[in-house]
Amino acid sequence: MTLIAEDQRHAGSELPVSVRSLDDEKKRALYQTAFHRTVNHSGWGNRLTGNCLPACQLILDDVKSHCKDAHIVIGQIYAGSKPETASKEISRIQAFAAGKGPCQTPSFHAWIDIGDDDFLDIVGASWLADQGFIKFNSIDFLDAARARENGAEYVSAIQDPTSVGAFYNLITASKGNK
């Protein structure tokens, strides 16, 4: 039921025109691809919200077919003002990825950098809406322009593929997933 509600929530959303390496039509298509692949992915759950990293993994090759240098970024997303604890949160992510932090998975968010100072975040808007930021409820995906327009701030912790892969593997192992 959640999946239907998420899909219906975004049906008919108006999207501003953009000129980036991925236009809004392609970004929306990638959002839909991630949505459908996540539904069929048993490893993490069957919805986008709360599954940013596997959703990014599931569409990265598709994004790379449009933006060859696309890569996953792990960090944090904030709406409104960034908390005083932001630098500690980023440090925890970096330590966990390096295997130097506590065994507990840190709070994090993942998105795809598509170059040209733009990104594709197919989960962030729904996550922010779930956190009580109602204005994100009618947005299906975030990119640099939408994030600025709606007061979302992204802070990167790791983005080199080796570290992101290590982070993914650590989290997958802690969840008992493949």
Image: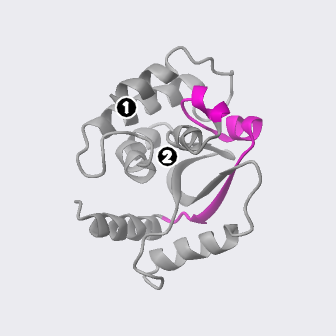
- Residue 40, by quadrant, is top left
Tag 1: amino acid = Thr
Q: Position of residue 100 (x, y in %)?
A: 47, 85
Magenta region: 134-160
Q: In this view, does 132 lie above or below 94?
A: above
User: Which is in the foreground here, disc 1 or disc 2?
Assistant: 1
Dot 2: within a 10 Å radius of its alpha carbon, few (fewer than 14), some, or many (20 or more) residues?
few
* Residue 92 tag number: none
Q: Is residue 23 visible?
A: no
- Callout 1 secondary element: helix
Farthest residue to the front: give it.
132
The residues bearing labels 1 and 2 have C-alpha atoms spaced at a distance of 33 Å
> Residue 39: horizontal and vertical position, in percent?
29, 36
Q: Residues within 10 Å of mark 1 (few under 14, many from 20)?
A: few
Numbered tag placed on residue 2 in the rendering: 1
Q: Is residue 149 above or below residue 153?
A: above
Q: What element carries label 2?
A: loop
Q: Which residue is drawn at 49% across and 69% down?
A: 106
Q: Between residue 160 and residue 39, name the one nearer to us.
A: 39
Would you identify the image quadrant in which residue 137 lies? Answer: top right
The residue that appears at 30% across and 69% down in the rendered structure is 174
Q: Nearer the viewer, residue 131 or 148?
A: 131
Classify residue 116 as left or right of residue 109.
Answer: right
**Furthest residue to the bottom?**
100
